[in-house]
Amino acid sequence: MRFTIYPAPNPWTPEKVKAYYRDPKVEWINGGELVSGGAIAASGFYVVHFCGNTDCCRPEGPFQSVDEAREWSHANLVPEVPRHA
Ligand SMILES: [Zn+2]
């Protein structure tokens, strides 16, 4: 008997990724915390990429407030959808 294994459908269509970056997860990260690409230089609010994992995609920041982080994401990451690592 033969089995065919189909890959799971990727739920992250470009439209869904854009929708995510309109209202992204924003986290406070302390300076010195280790994330993808090395330690965070300065404490602040950071936009977490759509995978939700700062170990594979370096978060964007720092920002002074959640609103500032969201506004930056809306202006910069919605038009230019980042690729997943
Ligand atoms: Zn990632």
Image (tube, grey):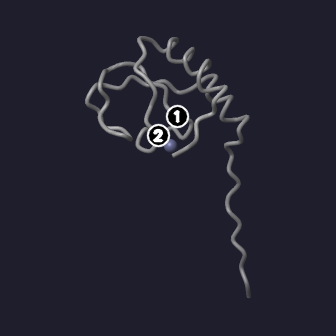
Q: Is 61 drawn above or below residue 2 in the view shown? A: above
Residue positioned 41% across, 11% down in the render: 64
Q: Which residue is mark 2?
A: 57
First in residue order: circle 2 vs circle 1: 1
Residue 37: x %, y % from top left = 36, 40
- Badge 1, how many Cα within 10 Å: few under 14, some, many 20+? many
Q: CA distance from mark 2 to mark 1?
A: 6 Å
Q: Secondary structure at mark 2?
A: loop
Nearer to us in this view, 37 or 48 = 37
Ligand 1 within 8 angstroms of badge 2 C-beta: yes
Q: Residue furthest left?
A: 32
Among the 4 quarters of the image, the one containing residue 56: top left
The quarter of the rendered structure image containing the N terminus is bottom right
Among the 4 quarters of the image, the one containing residue 27: top left
Q: Is 5 drawn above or below residue 31 in the view shown? A: below
Residue 21: x %, y % from top left = 61, 27
Nearer to us in this view, 47 or 3 = 47
Residue positioned 68% across, 58% down in the render: 8
- Badge 2, how many Cα within 10 Å: few under 14, some, many 20+? some
- Circles 2, 1 touching at the beta carbon (< 8 Å): yes
Residue positioned 51% across, 38% down in the render: 52
Q: Residue furthest front?
A: 80
Residue 83: x %, y % from top left = 58, 41
Answer left or right for 67 relative to 62: right
Ligand 1 within 8 angstroms of badge 1 C-beta: yes
Q: Secondary structure at mark 1?
A: loop
Please, what is the three-letter code of the amino acid marked with disc 1?
Answer: His
Among the 4 quarters of the image, the one containing residue 29: top left
